[in-house]
Image (spheres, rainbow, N blue to C red):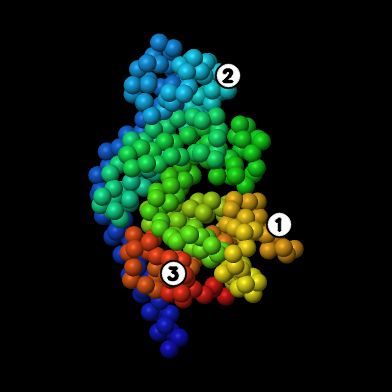
Amino acid sequence: MKQIVVFSIIILTFLSCKSDNAIEAEILKIESNFVVERFDKVFASAKPESLTQLKKTFPFLFSKRIPDSLWIERMTDSFQVALNDAIIKELGDFNTPTQDIKRLFQHLRYYDQTFTEPRVITLTNFVDYRNKIVVTDSLVLIAIDNYLGSEHEFYSGIARYITKNMKPSQIVVDLAKAYGEKQIFQSEKKTLLDDMIYFGKQLYFKDKVIPFKTDAEKIGYIQDELEFAQVNEEMIWTQFVQNEMLYSTDSSLPARFIADAPFSKFYLELDNQTPGRLGQYIGWQIVRAYMKNNDVSLQNMMQKDAIEIFNKSNYKPPK
C-alpha cells in the first residue's frame, strides 16, 4: 500500500510539472512589444536647452510646482552625476531586467486578457527606496538607482535587511508585487490572519506571474532565511496558534511578523536567528494550500476574504 501511495504521488507530480511546462510554453508565445524608455539616460546627457523637449516627451515627470531652474541645477548636481555613472556601471544596457519584465507582462496577459502593456520608464529619485516603483494602468516608473546592488556604497546608511533586495534581480519582483496589489481585494485588515492572507495572496500571485524567480527572490529572503522558514514552519505555526495570535487585533503583531524587519519577534531566544516577515511566509503557504485544495482561478482567489481562504485551505505545516 505504501508503495502505491508513493507511486501515485510521483505520477501526480509528473503530470503537474507537464501541465506547468505546457502553460509556460503557451505563455512564451504571447507577443510583447513594450520598450523600456530610459529617461535616466536621456536626462544624464541633457542640456538646459533640451529641457523643453524633455517636458513634452515626459510631461508626467515634471511637476508644475518645480521651477525649471531646479531641473537645470539637477543636471550638474554632483550626486546626480554619480548616480548616472553608477547606473551605467552596474546596470549597463538594462537587458536582463528588460527580459524579466517582458516575461512578467506575458504572464500577466495570460492570466488577464484585458491587460495591456504600459509605457515603462526608468529614472532616478536620489535613492528614495520607499518609492522604487509606480504602476498605473498605462504607466510603469522604475527608479533604478535603488537597484545598484545590495553592497553598493550609496546604500551604506540603509539597514542591511532593506539593502539585501536593492539589486537588479529584484526589479521584476517589485514590479510583480505592485501589480498584485492592484488586483487584491480584501475586507479591512483587522487581525494578524488578515495580514497574513493578504501577503500570502501577493506572494502566490508572484508564483504565477514570475515563476522563473526563486521562492527566496519572491519573498525577498536570502537562501538561508528561506531555509529557516521552511525547516521551522511547524514551530512558527505552533507559536501563532498557541499564543492565540491569528485572530488577535493587537496592533503590535504586524510590526513583529509582517512588516520589513531584521528579524521576527516571538520574544524567544531564537529571535535573532529568524528572518523578518515570517507572518507573510506562513500566509503564503496557507494560500498555496487553498489553491491546491480548491478549484479556483487566480483572479477569483485574489477577491476572497481571508477567513474563507484559511477555512478552506486545510493548511497543515509539514512535520
Give the percent coordinates (x, y) of residue 131.
51, 39
* CA distance separating discs 1 and 3: 31 Å
Give the percent coordinates (x, y) of residue 173.
46, 47
- Quarter of the rendering occupied by the C terminus: bottom right
- Identify the residue under disc 3: 309
The residue depicted at 55 percent of the width and 64 percent of the height is 191
Earlier sequence position, callout 1 versus callout 2: 2
- Quarter of the rendering occupied by the N terminus: bottom left
Earlier sequence position, callout 3 versus callout 2: 2
Give the percent coordinates (x, y) of residue 91.
47, 32
The residue depicted at 60 percent of the width and 67 percent of the height is 248
Q: Which type of secondary structure does the marked residue at label 3 adopt?
A: helix
Q: Is residue 316 left or right of residue 184?
A: right
* CA distance separating discs 1 and 2: 39 Å
- Identify the residue under disc 2: 78
- Identify the residue under disc 1: 272
